[in-house]
Image: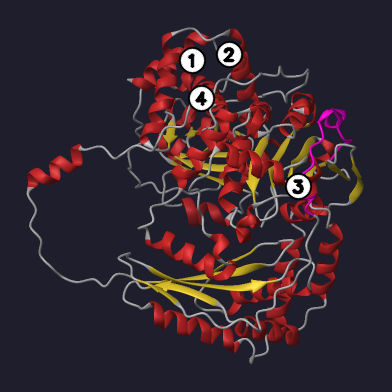
Amino acid sequence: MLPRLCLFLSILLAGDSTLPNGIRVYETSESGDSGNSFEWTAGYRTGVRNETVGTRALADVVAAFLKSTPSVRAMAVAAYGAGGEIEFFSDTDRTGIRLKMPVWAKPMVEDAVSDFLSETPLKSPELVDRALNEVRSRMPAVSDVRTSVEEQFRMAVLGPGAKFDLTGVTRKTVDDFFAMHYGTDRAFVVMNSAPMKSLQSVEGRTSLAGPNEPGIESVNAAGRAPLPSLRIQSDLEEGAVILGVPVSSVYYRNWYAFLMLDRLIHEVVQANPATTLRPSLDSYFYRMEVAVPSGQTAGAAETALLQELAQLQYVRASSEQIDAARRSAIQYLESAPVQEWFLSLGVAERRGEGLDWVRSFSADDMRATARDLVEAKPVIASWSPRVRTLGLSVEKLSDIEARAAKPPAPAPPKPGLGPVRLTPFPVHSDAALSEHAPVRLDSGVSIVASSAFAVFVAPDSLKTFDREPGPDLMQTSYGAFRSSRILVMAPPDSLDRAKQQWAQFQGNPIDTAPVTIDGKITSADIPALLVLKMLLDRRLIESDLWNDIQVEIRAAEGPTLSIRGREDSRRIVRDWIREIASRPLPEADLEWAREAAVHHLPGIRPQLQSLIWVLNSDGLIPDLHLIPSSQIQDVARIYLQ
């Protein structure tokens, strides 16, 4: 897994301290991005592992509450506007927020971090009600087969406390739960710079349940009676077999042994299971799932899976398989999110011990772990796919038309949230945009400098590459197209080499596919479309809808905005576009959106260049700071037509 936070690839504990208010601060050594990125993670050492005592639903409500608070939305707007990234997380042991942005933008969020750790339900009771409604609306219908199986499975593995239940939960229930588990004595901050002084201003709160020090209990399944398989009746097209087995905390070698076994299972088990092994400070469980395709039964799939797992304790894995599993396990333990997880919970040394165990893991250890899995009396839940039968049914055309005309029931709307405090961009220097028109090579292919390696085949196929594609890709992937349909993009330092390669390209002269694009937005209006997207994204963040709706510009879909989400949510965005089209934009909002567009241009530049080129082969991306409000309004009107 490639880490999103490059800083933690080779994390070193540079310093840690506990502030008078109880917040634990961990400072990491500088690495990655040459010190150009400011990165931090902040939150609480409280997560959904409370499910074992029946409070998982309350933990989900608190997570939804924190995600909607003004401080989080203000940080999200600041990070997004600066071209950074922000992520809210809630795992088995933690609830919090992760942020990465340019160093120059750090002043935009310094106060918001301390504001986030000062948020409590008592300060924003209306957001508690909103969070309760949101979590309740996310709960699937009890009649749903997978929901029913998952609930029974989790209760069998974790006990009756795993039942997701919000019956009788009120605002006061959430207030009391927050006071029990989310004091500043459970708060943490991990950052790659000196601790911010504003953290000391956070008023201390003591968790009534205690500071939640790491637990070190192990799992002993030897005395547990085997549970019968949970067989569920289903009418789904595909079935599944789910297996769960208890695993100890990261304090024990058992967890790292299961990590190695998991990697081997992905190498050798033919059923191709999907597996989940989460690091946890307390005992949890290892989960495995295999699909049961139509025409097979869950019982047969379950038997075959158990036989393959049992075989692992008798057949010695080869040195190549052990080495592959070891490399995968080490890569996982050294990945950015995992290093951050151990550090934020104050158990970084456990990861080092785990790495030592993994490096010394042998084939005999693997067989012993496979035996532990089999003898742990796994909990198994399954359902078979629906049996297909031939039949004849008669239906009135009028009934079909009536159902088609009836719109689906909308989801309960979230109460609207107002704009957040907008922090001005600090003084900084953006990379100069040196834009040149695409060059037509002798082969007929067009090529242009861009921010990434990409190839666009008009009218609707764009592929970007993580690294420079080899010359063999030209003919194998693009030889079926005529040269005039192809636009090649490459970073400036690789442009000359790309020109030499693509000058030798031989296209397909008999390719006569038409190159037509629907839509009224012109090549000159594409940059204004990007600024309009920035305005809409900001409103989505401010309204806490950024996980529900995505507004995208995609070359494959033509010169328009692609709005993804439920119809009632898309309607909200269309109303915003209608509002933007109807009145001039406030100057502050316009300036923010243009600056945000500049910061996001590197990531979206191949999409824009492809659209502009297919509409006008000589078109350029202009200085985004100069796009007038009137042009953005015109683009909004055109979109609504």
On-image quarter of the C terminus = top left
Q: Quadrant of residue 148?
A: bottom left
Rendering colour mode: secondary structure
Predominant SS of the magenta segment: loop
Res 590 label: 2
Q: Residues within 10 Å of mark 4 (few under 14, many from 20)?
A: many
Whether label 1 touches label 2, CB < 8 Å: yes
Q: Classify mark 1: helix, strand or loop.
A: helix
Residue at point 42%, 51% (across, down)? 140
Query: Alpha-carbon distance for marks 4 and 1?
Result: 12 Å
Q: Is residue 441 visible?
A: no
x, y (%) of residue 486? 47, 40
Mark 2 residue type: Leu
Left or right of residue 26: residue 434: left
Query: Alpha-carbon distance for marks 4 and 3?
Result: 29 Å
Q: Residues within 10 Å of mark 2 (few under 14, many from 20)?
A: many
Mark 3 residue type: Cys
Mark 1 residue type: Ile
Res 6 label: 3
Query: Who is closer to the viewer here, 110 or 448?
Result: 110
For residue 162: magenta?
no
Mark 4 residue type: Leu
Q: Residues within 10 Å of mark 3 (few under 14, many from 20)?
A: some
Q: Classify mark 2: helix, strand or loop.
A: helix
Which of the two discs, 4 and 3, labels the residue nearer the N terminus? Answer: 3
Q: Mark 1 highlights which residue?
A: 632
x, y (%) of residue 611? 47, 31
Which of the two discs, 3 and 2, labels the residue nearer the N terminus? Answer: 3
Q: Mark 4 highlights which residue?
A: 536
Residue at point 25%, 37% (across, down)? 407
Whether label 4 touches label 3, CB < 8 Å: no
